[in-house]
Amino acid sequence: MEKDLYQNTKKNEKADSNDKRRRNKNRGNRIISIAALALLLAACSVPSGRAEETQNAGIKEEPKEWLEEHGNCGVQELSGYLYEHASVSPYASAEITIKGYEGEKLETEWNAPSAFRFGGEADVTWRYYNSLGEMETALNEAAMEEIDVDALHFLYYTFPMTENNCALDLYYILKKRFDAKEHPLTAWSTDNGKLFYYIQETLKEEDGHEFSYLYNRNSRVNLYVKDHMAYGLTLLNRLSEEDDETLEYVFDDIIQRYGILGSGWGLDEENLYWADHDTRLTELENPKRSFLEVRGISEDWEFAGDEGIMRYFGLLMEADYELPLTEDGRMLSLHFSLAKEDGEEEDTELRYYLLNGFCMDEPYDMTVTDMDTGEVLQERRVSLSIELTDTITYPDLNGDGYADMRIGAPVHMNGAKAVEEDYAPPDYLLWDPQTEQFVRKTEKEVANSSRAVANGLTEEEQEEKTKRERSDFFALVYELPEWAEPEDYIKLTDDKMVEYEVQEGDSLWRISERFYGTGYKWTTIVRTGDAPENPNYLLAGETVFIPEICYIPKDPYSRGGLCSEGSFQIEQPAGFAHHFLSDNVTYIPWKEENQIYSLPVTNPVGENPFHEPEDWEAFQAEVIRCSEELCPGRVSSLTFEKSHMEDGCDLYGYSFEYDTGEEILEYVDFFKFGKANMSEVIGVREQEPNTVLVNTVRYMAASFTDYGGEPGMSWGDGVAPNIGADKWEYPYLHNLFEAAGEQFGTEN
């Protein structure tokens, strides 16, 4: 009996001790939460405090006395109760105690707001204040109060954002006080850009990957802003990680009353700045320059109303530069101002833009002035990007000693700061010392001018020189230079034979090593009909025949532009207008451009259909037939190629000239079959007296490597049938005669 009593006493003491520790832990957690909340409110009151002091200077108004209000409701109705509550003061807080809590998230349609089912009752105590400072003091006093550890305790609060409460300033203050590596502070915009909030995310590593979660109950900052009012929600007694995760649904249910939180956009500092500012002036040096920006509005966000934060961006209104024309020469002043359309009045309100969702530039009037004499040297219109002020640089582009102009063309899109993309090429303006003006040039014209300066020629003379000396990098090479590395070349053999006179001590193996670099190719060497049958017996002076070998230099930069891991790869040399190969093969008259189409696709035949001589001859006959029937009188110089490659594949190609009635075009087609995938490469260009297009197309097709991946991994599956597939017996290849006929109207 004594033993049992002793044990029960120990058990009771242990239970009391655990309960005491649990109470102390929850009390400590609550103190931490209140302290964090006090910091948050203090942060929010930094800018507004000054405003209050200014507003109250010389005005002594007695503070109002606010009575507490008490209410209760089911947790299911809590969000509506808080949202509809009419506060007697803009500064208010509600202490919420929930007992018997149960939560469940219901399934809803993807485009519908979240829905929840809750159990339990909520007791709400409202308190009102005259200022943020008064609210902060009251919450600090509440930090030491005992709370029921068996209930959930939340604090809901609201206060107005004054004119001096800038979204970006608040972000900086909160970030300085609360940002952590494990819980970074971020800003988000939801509800079509009308609601934005500051929150601490939770970063977790799972299976070697880092994921970001918006775990609201673990965040010390849950601050929402809408219509210049701030709303916050904090869990006062932090529970353990094992607690029911549906506790987070309380946050979602309460806050989603103020906007749709199901999806949103991350806000950067630029977005937050333009939420509260109408202008921005930036001044920089080297060269001395200044930029005046105004707040623009995206028309794509018209349904967000004027309060939609994602609607705003910085639009460059004016830019001024002071530029030294030469290292020791005179100074120029360049002024850019946003151009007005004819009849358009001066901007007095925010400017609308981005009607199509994205744009690269805006028209600006440029004025170039001699700063020494005040003489206006040039007036013209140029294009500049929005949202990225310093897009103009002044390098000496052609090396003539004068400053030139490079105008970048970054692309602006909704919700993203402008960045310079590959498909938005910059503009180039070279200084012409004779006319004393900036002259627009293309990138190729800039390169030509640079070469002209280096060679002491005029730009016209250099252009003629370049045409005469144009190199054909991928031209076939029949003998490798002594310094060449074999791995830098693709080796081909064809059906042409080279005669070789056998030397004393030769064997088929040694001859193969000499010509191919390996003795295993000895079976390709052909002997005359009267030669001894024994392959090991060669007579000195005997003539043997070896397939001709040629080489294609590989792209030194190895631009593997089209590839699928484990399936295939094909090179994309620079200097060519490249298109993905689909049903449409169209010639576009771009000056100085080689147009090339390529795309590996699944090999539909599962083998090389032209390996046997008779099959290749049948294909040539079909090509000739199509050229005559589909393009009568328009095709000339039709040639064919077939080569064998070291990887065991064959390379096929044909080319021809096509008369459009106005000009002669070159068409080139090379293709190669792999085990799982095949590649067809097509080139089109205006006729020129060189073989640049043929050799480049041949190289790209020859560079195609099939790694034996599963069929169907390639990019071309599921596209429309190849053009002209129904016009001949080879539907897995493009019929270039049908393509040319459709574009240039052979029926006429």
Image (cartoon, rainbow, N blue to C red):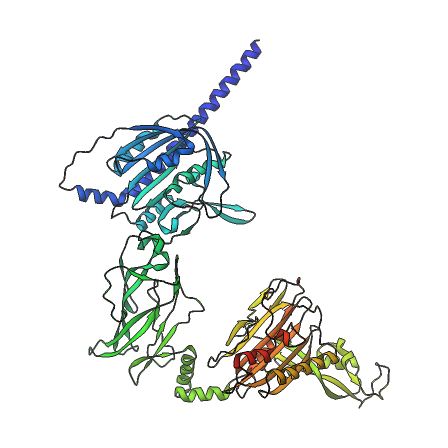
Q: Which residue is most to the top? A: 1
Q: Which residue is most to the bottom? A: 541
Q: Residue at x 50, y 21 (%)?
A: 15
x, y percentage for residue 645? 68, 76
| Closer to us: 394 or 348 | 348
x, y percentage for residue 71? 34, 28
Residue 553 visible in the picture = no
- On screen, residue 512 versus residue 453, left or right, reads right
Q: Quadrant of residue 359?
A: bottom left
Q: Is residue 724 above or below residue 634?
A: above
| Closer to us: 529 or 557 | 529
Name the quadrant of the N terminus: top right
x, y percentage for residue 642? 68, 80
- On screen, residue 135 versus residue 658, left or right, reads left
- On screen, residue 34 versus residue 333, left or right, reads right
Q: Quadrant of residue 488?
A: bottom right
Q: Which residue is most to the left? A: 58
Residue 337 visible in the picture = yes
Q: Is residue 634 above or below residue 362?
A: below
Q: Is residue 6 above or below residue 411?
A: above
